[in-house]
Image: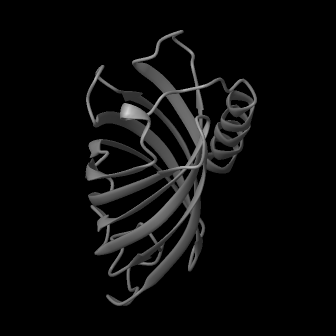
């Protein structure tokens, strides 16, 4: 059942990316830095490739483990016909280190120094107040851990980024 939910989520992600339209960045800058609260709780860096695409990288303390490092390839689309609020979606990958607390494993006796590798699908909304260098975002993701065990889990995060 979880794998079917992930497949539907990925299909919706790619269909939504096909509808992409131009989205604005704060003061038309390409590089942003910020914080994420949720999964993971940590630092966020985003590089805008163009008005419709970006690469988002993050590192933080995972609720279900120690350290989680990942990157997402995001497409923006104007679902609300707004220059302030846009939606984004895309695929990503991550590596997690630590005990995992069932994030990376199904077995109760997994080592505390385990490493998990997986893929994810992201769907989010960002809010860019006019004439500022700030972006506020809320996103949900479904992670599929591939190594060491197959495990699917949904997540949600909120954060902000500053574009210097």
Farthest-out residue, top:
81
3 relative to 87, above or below: below
Asked where in the image residue 111 lies, by quadrant, the reply is bottom left
Pinpoint residue 90: horizontal percent, then vertical percent.
61, 44
Q: Viewer-proximal residue, 5 or 9? A: 9
108 relative to 17, above or below: below
Asked where in the image residue 19 lies, by quadrant, the reply is top right
Total marks in image: 0
Pinpoint residue 104: horizontal percent, then vertical percent.
46, 72
Pinpoint residue 79: horizontal percent, then vertical percent.
57, 15
Colour treatment of the image: one colour
Residue at the image point whose x is 54% and y is 9% from the top? 81
Residue at the image point whose x is 56% and y is 80% from the top? 148
Residue at the image point whose x is 57% and y is 74% from the top? 149
Pinpoint residue 54: horizontal percent, then vertical percent.
56, 47
Residue at the image point whose x is 65% and y is 23% from the top? 21
Q: Viewer-proximal residue, 133 or 9? A: 133
For residue 61, side relative to residue 86 (left or right)? left
Asked where in the image residue 150 lies, by quadrant, the reply is bottom right
Quadrant location of the N terminus? top right
């Amino acid at each position: 059942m979880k794998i079917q939910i992930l497949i539907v989520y990925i299909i919706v992600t790619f269909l939504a990316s096909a509808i992409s339209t131009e989205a604005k960045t704060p003061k038309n800058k390409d590089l942003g830095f910020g914080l994420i609260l949720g999964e993971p709780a940590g630092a966020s860096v985003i590089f805008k490739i163009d008005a419709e695409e970006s690469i988002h990288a993050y590192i933080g303390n995972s609720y279900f483990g120690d350290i989680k490092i990942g990157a997402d390839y995001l497409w923006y689309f104007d679902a609300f016909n707004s220059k302030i609020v846009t939606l984004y979606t895309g695929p990503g990958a991550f590596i997690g280190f630590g005990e995992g607390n069932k994030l990376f494993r199904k077995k109760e006796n997994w080592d505390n120094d385990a490493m998990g590798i997986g893929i994810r699908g992201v769907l989010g909304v960002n809010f860019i107040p006019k004439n500022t260098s700030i972006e506020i975002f809320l996103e949900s993701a479904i992670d599929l851990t591939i190594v060491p065990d197959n495990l699917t889990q949904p997540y949600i995060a909120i954060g902000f980024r500053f574009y210097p």
